[in-house]
Amino acid sequence: MTPKQIDAILLRNMFLLGAKNLEANKQAVDALNVFPVPDGDTGTNMHLTLQAVVRALDKPNLDTCAAVAQVVASGSLMGARGNSGVILSQLFRGFSRSLERKTVLQGTDFALALMAGVETAYKAVGRPVEGTILTVARDAARAAQAKARTEQDIAKVMQAVIEQAEKTLVRTPEMLPVLKKAGVVDAGGQGLVYIYRGFLQALLGQELEAPVAIEAPKLTLVPEQAHFAPTEIEFQYCTEFLILHPRVEDHMLRPGLEAYGDSLLVVGDEGVIKVHIHTNHPGTVMELALEHGELSGIKIENMKEQHAHTAWAEEGLKVARPGSDKSIGVVAVAAGDGLREVFLSLGADVVVSGGQTMNPSTEDLAAAVNSLACERAVILPNNKNVILAASQVKEVTNKEVAVVASRTVPQGLAAMLSYEADATELERVARAMHRRMSGVKTGLVTYAVKSYNGDVGEIAEGDILGLSDKGIDTVGTDVNEVALALLANMVTDDDGVISLFAGAETDEAYAKSLVESIKAKFPNCELEFFTGGQPVYYYILSVE
């Protein structure tokens, strides 16, 4: 017999089975790639976001639907990766806010919560685009509301949700020409359908096999001037815990905890607060927290022990905390040792390892911001799929944050050229960096992950692709030839500087042969060559 109400146990199982069903199908979602470039990570990002939810749900005292929903909202917010993960977290956030003080849910409550999630997600996206996960979620929520008016059986309400979601999903190519051209439906919408199917499995009483809570990949924070030597770590213990049923709001905790360490992260919704801090007195910190609620999920790690055997442990370097000598710090996202060094040399304080196909989460970026000694920070996402996650950081830190929405590494590097290390006005600095990056052109050389029929003709899997700011520009079979052809279409008489960043898979001698070809073909341009070490792209090109 299917339920006419949802209790806390059932709601928890719905999210667990939703996560499990998406995990089983994430590769299918990744495969719904609009373009043939290595960018098919929508399923992976949604999966990693939901794995943060799975980990968050592994705790006691979730005895009301409101408590379960709050944990889902906070877990997904902190674990959100990529645009799809952030939008998913906002769907859950609005869902949670609609369920305040709800012990159980009727069908009408559930439908109302789905629509509240849609409204929150639409507000979170600066320019909502129809034909995406947003449209699928909105139409599905409307179907839930219509069905719940006459049907008490929540499984039947959920079936109506899925039926409408699938109908809308099929129509997404008609709403977005880019989907129609690629012959695919929207990947985020498809991922949401898989999650909703998991919800239905739980409502139908299918046996719940315990899903494995996969630990999220740890993305590296690289501070300025190499690494911290263990003997010079100011605060020894990385301390994390949850405060269950807190008697204060998260922002009220921060002032009292700040005096006991650094890298402080305090984020929560009603029902739970997550605390992360590097401190020399974890016991004192937890005693203070105990005054405000029950502690759970305690984890204390000795950072000196963790790094005692690394190569730099013998160097005896004394490294200042990032951003200690300025009012405004910079957090940049980049993958590859060479790119990291370039960003640091231009004044960035922390580089979060990530980018194409490996998007950092909101929590990763917030941890980087909180590692700064200064109270203001600029974030350079350097990838279009990281911008939304970066925009959520200001909600989970007490520092002042501005996101300069760089969509590529060259844009981020150009923005750094306008960064003033001695400046004190965050908005003025951010505006100047944004203006500076608008004048740079980006070129990327990569490979096709599938066959595709585009404006440049037929593309076969394995072909070499040259991408400009406008899309696929050049196709060929030789990496250097494609790079030269791409540059020929990018460089104008007004341009004077070409920057070339060789990737991890590019042979040094081969790259240097391209350098000579560029010098010969563009004698009026100054050429800067770097070993970027980035994955995915054989070359990153910058022209200005």
Image (cartoon, rainbow, N blue to C red):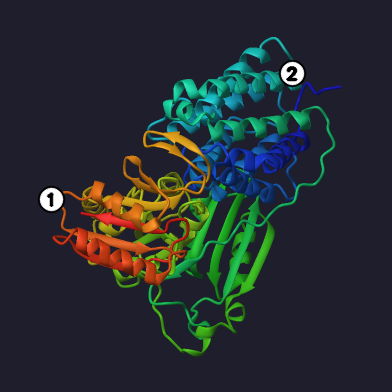
First reached walking from the N terminus: tag 1 or tag 2: 2
For the N terminus, which image quadrant?
A: top right
For the C terminus, which image quadrant?
A: bottom left
Residue type of the residue flagged with mark 2: Lys
Residue furthest top in the image: 150
Q: State how far apart marks 1 and 2 are (Cα).
A: 64 Å
Q: Residue at x 59, y 54 (%)?
A: 274
Q: Is residue 519 left or right of residue 147?
A: left
Element under label 1? Answer: loop
Element under label 2? Answer: helix
* Closer mark to the observer between disc 1 and disc 2: 1
- Residue 377, horizontal then vertical, whole percent: 35, 58
Residue type of the residue flagged with mark 1: Asp
- Residue 24, horizontal then vertical, whole percent: 71, 42
Q: How many labels sit on residues?
A: 2
Q: Is residue 184 left or right of residue 491?
A: right
The vertical placement of 519 against 189, above or below, is below
Q: Is residue 394 left or right of residue 40?
A: left
Give the camera-side residue of 282 and 348.
Answer: 348
- Residue 430, horizontal then vertical, whole percent: 27, 52
Give the camera-side residue of 266 and 473.
Answer: 473
Quarter of the figure with residue 92: top right
Q: Which mark is residue 72?
A: none
Give the camera-side residue of 116 and 390.
Answer: 390
Q: Is residue 201 left or right of residue 35?
A: right
Q: Which mark is residue 156?
A: 2
Question: In this rendering, does residue 297 appear at all?
Answer: yes
Q: Residue at x 67, y 39 (%)?
A: 25
- Residue 164, horizontal then vertical, whole percent: 62, 19
Task: Find disc 1 in the rendering and name its residue.
Answer: 493
